[in-house]
Image (cartoon, rainbow, N blue to C red):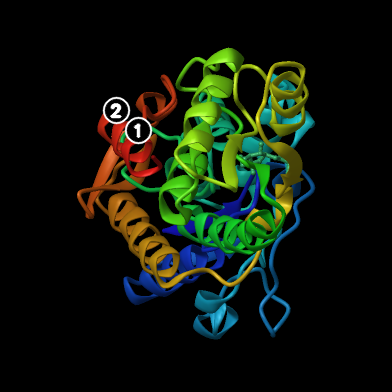
């Protein structure tokens, strides 16, 4: 079988480890792998990764050391052209012409929806791997890049806490998560932040200010509020403006971490899980599966029908939120 592999959407630390696992597993089973550059857009432009001999087939050595590096060596993109039916038909014709039998797209919700759309026009097999720092897909307990993003955010919060202490200040630190509070909640718990403001729970400005007064009375002199960019009322700047208009008891500053969270050396957890999911994707193709995600549940590999993975956003366990609140008092 000739397998095409690509990264699509926002890059995530660990994507390279996933591609490496796909290549090494597939070659060990007698399959071939074509690396497609720049996701769906690169496919439309027939951008293939060339091996040292100048051929569009990946060899064992093509992915040497990829396990340890962030970013996406196959590059990534968000493609407007592929969102159109014409683009999807064109991609199907290119896959046909290149003799590709199966695809492993690595990405998030948009990538998976694209895979389903492509499958309307192309009858090759498709098994996706969950690659997004947001950790917001259903059917898998983990998405590639989440651990590194949280590590980066926690490092930043620890540093900001030092200056917050020195000046008796409050900081609102905005983390990524387009529709999800996962990065915010994990970062808040791991850094001992006082609050997380997330899209999964209603944001009430007066309630936050009331809580801040309680914390001040209890002797807190610095406050860290972790804000998910996707909060229903907006990001950290908007929250800060609104808290200032009320009777906020702390002098405040805003830090937006942004794309810092998408880069960097993948943590061992991201490397391991990305390897597991890439390996699982090839095994699933070999079993004849299609239109599924190769994810994990309780650390075991699972195949989940693609539409089930983006039917809604992965909820955050209420117990985690309860714990966060009690520990931050
Ligand atoms: O989906 C991953 C993500 O990093 C989100 O957290 C964020 O909202 C988005 O991508 C940013 O996308 P872009 O890099 O295209 O601005």
Residue 37, position as x, y percentages in the image: 70, 57
Label 1 neighbour load within 10 Å: few <14, some 14-19, many 20+: some
- Above or below, comparing residue 283 to residue 315 in the picture: below
Residue for badge 1: 321
Residue 87, position as x, y percentages in the image: 73, 29
- Ligand 1 within 8 Å of disc 1? The answer is no
Residue positioned 55% across, 45% down in the render: 107
Question: Circle 2 sits in a helix, a strand or a loop, which is it?
Answer: helix
Residue positioned 69% across, 84% down in the render: 53
Q: Is residue 135 left or right of residue 298?
A: right
Quarter-of-image position of residue 243 = top right
Can residue 102 be spotted in the picture? no
Can residue 120 be spotted in the picture? yes
Residue for badge 2: 318
Q: Say whether marks 1 and 2 touch (CB < 8 Å).
A: yes
Give how far apart the Cα atoms at labels 1 and 2 are. Answer: 5 Å
Q: In this view, does 9 lie to the left or right of 103?
A: right
Q: Is residue 315 left or right of residue 243?
A: left
Label 2 neighbour load within 10 Å: few <14, some 14-19, many 20+: few
- In depth, the one of 233 and 167 nearer the eye is 167
- Above or below, comparing residue 132 to residue 269 in the picture: above
């Amino acid at each position: 079988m000739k397998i095409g592999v690509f990264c699509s959407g926002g890059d995530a630390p660990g994507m390279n480890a996933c591609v490496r696992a796909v290549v090494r597993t597939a070659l060990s089973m007698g399959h071939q792998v074509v690396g497609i550059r720049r996701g769906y857009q690169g496919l439309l432009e027939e951008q293939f990764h060339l091996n040292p001999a100048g051929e569009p087939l990946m060899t064992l050595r093509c992915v040497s050391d990829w396990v340890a590096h962030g970013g996406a060596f196959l590059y990534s993109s968000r493609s407007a052209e592929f969102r159109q039916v014409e683009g999807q038909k064109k991609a199907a014709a290119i896959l046909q012409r290149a003799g590709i039998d199966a695809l492993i797209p690595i990405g998030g919700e948009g990538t998976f929806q694209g895979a389903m759309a492509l499958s309307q026009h192309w009858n090759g097999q498709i098994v996706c791997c969950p690659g997004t720092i947001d950790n917001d897909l259903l059917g898998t307990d983990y998405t590639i890049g989440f651990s590194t993003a949280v590590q980066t955010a926690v490092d930043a919060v620890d540093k900001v806490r030092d200056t917050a202490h020195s000046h008796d200040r409050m900081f609102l630190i905005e983390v990524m998560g387009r529709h999800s509070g996962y990065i915010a909640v994990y970062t808040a718990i791991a850094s001992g932040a006082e609050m997380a403001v997330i899209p999964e729970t209603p944001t009430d400005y007066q309630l936050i200010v009331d809580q801040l007064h309680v914390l001040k009375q209890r002797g807190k002199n610095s406050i860290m509020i972790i804000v998910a960019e996707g909060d229903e009322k907006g990001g950290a700047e908007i929250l800060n403006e609104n808290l200032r208009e009320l009777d906020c008891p702390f002098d405040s500053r805003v830090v937006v971490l942004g794309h810092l969270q998408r880069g960097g050396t993948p943590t061992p957890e991201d490397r391991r899980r990305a390897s597991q999911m890439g390996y699982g994707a090839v095994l699933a193709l070999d079993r004849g599966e299609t239109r599924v995600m190769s994810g994990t549940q309780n650390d075991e590999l699972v195949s989940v029908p693609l539409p089930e993975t983006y039917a809604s956003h992965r909820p955050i366990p209420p117990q985690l939120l309860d714990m966060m609140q009690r520990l931050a008092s």
